[in-house]
């Protein structure tokens, strides 16, 4: 994890993220992708990256580096990062803070700006703080439980 509170560094992160997001919205994104995002009301502007008092960047390590410089492969990296991320978000919410998952693509600028070693790649960027009075949360329909759960119950005993 990297914890960023420096205003100048947060500004640099915002500028780099917005450059990537702008390219995505203007050139990389298909019409289908744009339509899928429409209910969220998002665009390439990311002011929350400077407004949030804290940015947390979770980096994944696909391999470690031994003292002799050779690589040691890490296994279950995506799964481990996902579990750590879920626990972190739950802990932040439990503490009364809010966050959102931000995944600008590509995210290599984060490794460069934060001077991370070559074996670390950005996994996710979390702006963290207290909720803004002006925050708008989209009212998204959730799938009913019956649509996402398949239950394998033990047979009833006779």
Image (tube, rainbow, N blue to C red):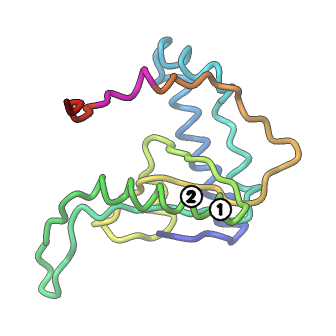
**The one of 60 and 67 positioned closer to us in this rendering:** 60
Q: Give coordinates of residue 117: x percent, y percent.
A: 34, 71
Residue 94 got which mark?
1
Q: Quadrant of residue 61?
A: bottom left
Residue denoted by label 2: 90
Q: How many marks?
A: 2
Q: Residue at x 64, y 34 (%)?
A: 44
Q: Give coordinates of residue 81: x percent, y percent.
A: 37, 58
Q: Residue at x 43, y 22 (%)?
A: 146
Q: Give coordinates of residue 118: x percent, y percent.
A: 30, 66
Q: Which residues are magenta?
A: 146-151
Residue, far bottom = 67
Inter-mark Cα distance, 2 to 1 = 6 Å
Give the quadrant of the C terminus: top left
Is 52 situated above or below 43?
A: below
Q: Residue at x 87, y 42 (%)?
A: 134
**The one of 46 and 36 positioned closer to us in this rendering:** 36
Is 118 situated above or below 98?
A: below
Question: Does the magenta-highlighted stretch encompass residue 150?
Answer: yes
Residue, far front = 158
Question: Does the magenta-highlighted stretch encompass residue 41?
Answer: no
Q: Mark 2: few, some, or many residues within 10 Å (few <14, many ≥20)?
A: few
Is 74 situated left or right of 42 in this image?
A: left
Q: Mark 1 falls on what kind of element?
A: helix
């Amino acid at each position: 994890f990297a914890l960023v509170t420096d205003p100048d560094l947060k500004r640099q992160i915002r500028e780099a993220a917005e450059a990537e997001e702008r390219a995505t919205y203007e050139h990389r994104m298909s019409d289908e992708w744009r339509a899928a995002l429409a209910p969220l009301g998002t665009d390439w502007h990311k002011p929350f990256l400077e407004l949030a008092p804290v940015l947390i960047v979770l980096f994944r390590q696909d391999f470690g580096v031994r003292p002799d410089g050779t690589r040691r492969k890490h296994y279950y990296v995506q799964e481990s990062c996902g579990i750590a991320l879920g626990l972190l978000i739950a802990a932040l919410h439990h503490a009364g803070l809010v966050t959102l998952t931000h995944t600008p693509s590509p995210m290599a600028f984060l490794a460069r700006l934060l001077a991370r070693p070559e074996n670390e790649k950005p996994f996710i960027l979390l702006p963290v703080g207290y909720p803004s009075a002006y925050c708008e949360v989209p009212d998204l329909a959730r799938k009913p439980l019956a649509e996402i759960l398949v239950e394998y119950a033990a047979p009833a005993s006779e």
